[in-house]
Amino acid sequence: RRCRHRAWTRVAPRVPAPLVPSTMTPESARGGEGDESVRLAHPRSRVAAAASASSRGGGTPGSWNLGVAHSAANKKDQRDYVDALFAQYPHLMEAAEADDRKKVQELMDAVYLPAPDASTAKIRDAQLRAAALAAARAGGAKSLRLLLDRGADLGLFDEVVGSDPEERLRCTMGIECAGRGRAEVLDVLLSEDVGVSTECRDPRNGMTALMAAARFGHAACIAVLVDRGADVDARSEYGSGAMGGGSTAAMMAAENGHAGALNALRAAGADVNLTREVDGKTAMQLHREKVTAEMKKLSNMGYVQGSSIGNYATEI
């Protein structure tokens, strides 16, 4: 009974969902021959279906709901393959970030085998891409190289239309690695099979990977980029004016006090006498100003010319 408008009315009882007969007998379910009895089962609820889907890795790259559950791939071997992927995915990410090449190879040989069909291949590829990106950002060059050799795709140029070289220059992963000093990873990214360009530019300031390496003093990254043919005299938007005469990599190294990076650029043929438009200064002028400021600071701290710290001025 329920009260409605202050009147007691009788509500008809809810009729349960009809039972659906199954073609499988109890004996056949146990593996033996069946008789005429019929097993009854309730239809599978949406809640149960959702729980099953979420237990198969929802929220991780290559979700079960985006793969096998919405395709014709419903055989047991295909589902077992995807279940194994989701079970080992955290271990793959951990090994990639730690650059544990041995562990990555074990997982590739035991779990991340060629997919049985196109739907499961999407899940495998998504997980390998995530692991490769994690290895790149963590500096795991050995794991990154192994993942790429086993078919991982970083997806750096997914949004590039056609073969327009200008579109490919928008990829900034090389700049990120150079700025962080990931020389080995940078070398992998610049390889032909990956396709990152030495002349890619940051859309915010026009900075190249070589400029990022010089700005933060990563001489090893400078060596990799120069070996790959980077333009040592390219200019950014820093210090540029109407004529676009911005800062070069040498200017950035000098202005930030990285004598080793400046020496590496000079050895590579960088012109340290180029001027930037905003103030007309060269890389050598910026270097001398930086040295003078440092010497003044050291003098105020009690250091004198000729000491081991004072000799910083003679590095270049």
Image (cartoon, grey):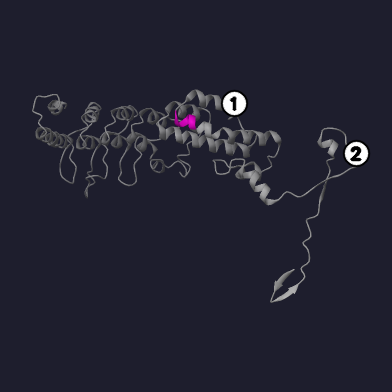
Could you classify mark 1 by the number of other residues whose Cα lies within 10 Å: few (under 14), some (14-19), or many (20 or more)?
A: few
In primary-sequence order, the first of circles 2 and 1 is 2
Q: In the rendered image, which quarter contains the N terminus?
A: bottom right
The range drawn in magenta is: 94-98
Image coordinates of residue 150 in percent, x first then y, are 53, 28
Left or right: 223 as drawn, with respect to 263: right
Q: Are the residues tagged 2 and 1 within 8 Å (C-beta)?
A: no
Q: Which residue is mark 2?
A: 35
Q: Which residue is mark 1?
A: 110
Image coordinates of residue 102 in percent, x first then y, are 50, 23
Q: Main secondary structure of the magenta part?
A: helix
Q: Secondary structure at mark 1?
A: helix
Q: Secondary structure at mark 2?
A: loop
The quarter of the displayed image where residue 250 is located:
top left
Viewer-nearest residue: 77 or 118? 77
Q: Residue at x 81, y 37 (%)?
A: 29
Label 1 is placed on what type of residue?
Answer: Ala
Left or right: 81 as drawn, with respect to 229: right
Image coordinates of residue 69 in percent, x first then y, are 65, 44
Number of marks drawn: 2
Label 2 is placed on what type of residue?
Answer: Asp
Q: Nearer the viewer, mark 2 or mark 1?
A: 2
Viewer-nearest residue: 156 or 178? 178
Q: Residue at x 8, y 27 (%)?
A: 305
Q: In the rendered image, which quarter contains the C terminus?
A: top left
Q: What numbered label is drawn on residue 218?
A: none
Q: CA distance from mark 2 to mark 1?
A: 43 Å
Image coordinates of residue 98 in percent, x first then y, are 44, 29
